[in-house]
């Protein structure tokens, strides 16, 4: 009988002498992992990505001191700590490439059109409060970039504007980085000098985001493929969900986009990545063109 560690949080040492070349992922095992990953979070590994999944799981399996991919699969499937272990699985299979001010055209659209339009509509109800969601926030650069733009360019224009920004990601490690508000030089490499000087403070070998920005931004772990979790994400005016749909098959894309639609208030906007489209995925949104980018509006 396979013996599993009592808890994944203990982080046991890798088996002595084991190297990456000791592991080979059979096609049958690949299909089993593909199914459990797809069922858990909607990410689908095509057949030609078998090598990628193999290499990403390898380090985790070795770290746990296990003997094979099948042993790790049984752990994910049957062990009492399996839900906790899935957090490490998600970290292994997700890519977290991001930086501040990554998508200037979307930020420009926010300043010139989207926020003024939403503010005008909300003033009719008596309270100018915007809820913004960075739905694949990674380590938080997107959410904080939005916070900086709003603080610097929009709050002076709309003194009554209240903003609540929520960042979510399936990867626990990057969420912890986001909450810390500390970023390496790589993350701020495209940050305009004006913003870098005004909203960041050097701290050791990192840069710390201004507390005035940080107070309006919160982060939590969120699986966009989890219907129950998504039901709690409601009443947002703007959603950014960049570079997530590319990892889903058409069925998963339709499910996630439908949930994002339900999370928006009427009149709200969804922004996705450069390489992504809602063509053949959803007809529920109205496409709105902005200079060098597009948005999807819930009418």
Image: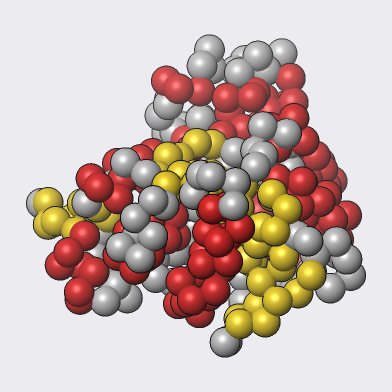
Q: Position of residue 265 (x, y in %)?
A: 69, 49
Return the residue nearer the eye: 167 or 6. Answer: 167
Q: Does residue 241 sit above or below 221 in this rendering?
A: below
Q: Residue at x 49, y 57 (%)?
A: 96
- Which residue shows up at 71% across the image and 68% down it? 296
Q: Position of residue 266 (x, y in %)?
A: 73, 53
Q: Is residue 227 left or right of residue 293?
A: right
Q: Is residue 170 above or below residue 241?
A: above
> What is the x, y in percent for residue 155?
35, 59
User: 243 or 62: nearer the eye?
Assistant: 243
Residue most extreme to the bottom:
291
Where residue 157 appears, as percent x and y from the top left, is 35, 65
Between 39 and 209, which is closer to the camera in this rendering?
Answer: 209
- 297 to the left or right of 81: right
Q: Residue at x 58, y 66 (%)?
A: 117
Q: Is residue 297 left or right of residue 20?
A: right
**Viewer-nearest residue: 228 or 95:** 228
Q: Residue at x 61, y 18 (%)?
A: 81
Q: Is residue 286 above or below residue 214?
A: below
């Amino acid at each position: 009988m396979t013996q599993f560690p009592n808890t994944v949080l203990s982080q046991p040492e890798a088996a002595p002498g084991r190297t990456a070349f000791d592991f080979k992922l059979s096609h049958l095992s690949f299909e089993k992992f593909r199914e459990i990953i797809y069922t858990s979070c909607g990410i689908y590994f095509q057949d030609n990505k078998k090598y990628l999944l193999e290499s990403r799981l390898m380090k985790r399996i070795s770290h746990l001191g296990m003997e094979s991919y099948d042993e790790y699969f049984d752990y994910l499937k049957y062990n009492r700590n399996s839900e906790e272990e899935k957090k490490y699985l998600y970290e292994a299979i997700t890519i977290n490439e991001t930086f501040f001010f990554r998508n200037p055209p979307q930020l420009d659209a926010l300043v010139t059109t989207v926020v003024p339009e939403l503010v005008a509509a909300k003033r009719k109800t008596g309270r100018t409060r915007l809820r913004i969601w960075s739905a694949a926030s990674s380590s938080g650069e997107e959410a904080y970039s939005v916070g900086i733009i709003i603080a610097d360019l929009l709050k002076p224009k709309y003194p009554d504007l209240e903003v609540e920004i929520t960042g979510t990601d399936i990867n626990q490690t990057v969420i912890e980085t986001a909450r810390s508000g500390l970023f390496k030089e790589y993350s701020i490499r495209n940050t305009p000098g004006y913003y870098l000087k005004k909203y960041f403070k050097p701290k050791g070998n990192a840069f710390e985001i201004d507390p005035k920005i940080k107070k309006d931004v919160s982060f939590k772990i969120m699986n966009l493929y989890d219907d129950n979790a998504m039901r709690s994400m409601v009443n947002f005016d703007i959603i950014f969900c960049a570079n997530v749909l590319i990892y889903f098959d058409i069925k998963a894309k339709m499910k996630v986009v439908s949930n994002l639609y339900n999370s928006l208030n009427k009149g709200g906007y969804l922004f996705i990545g450069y390489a992504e489209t809602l063509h053949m995925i959803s007809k529920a949104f109205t496409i709105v063109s902005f200079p060098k980018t597009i948005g999807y509006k819930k009418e």
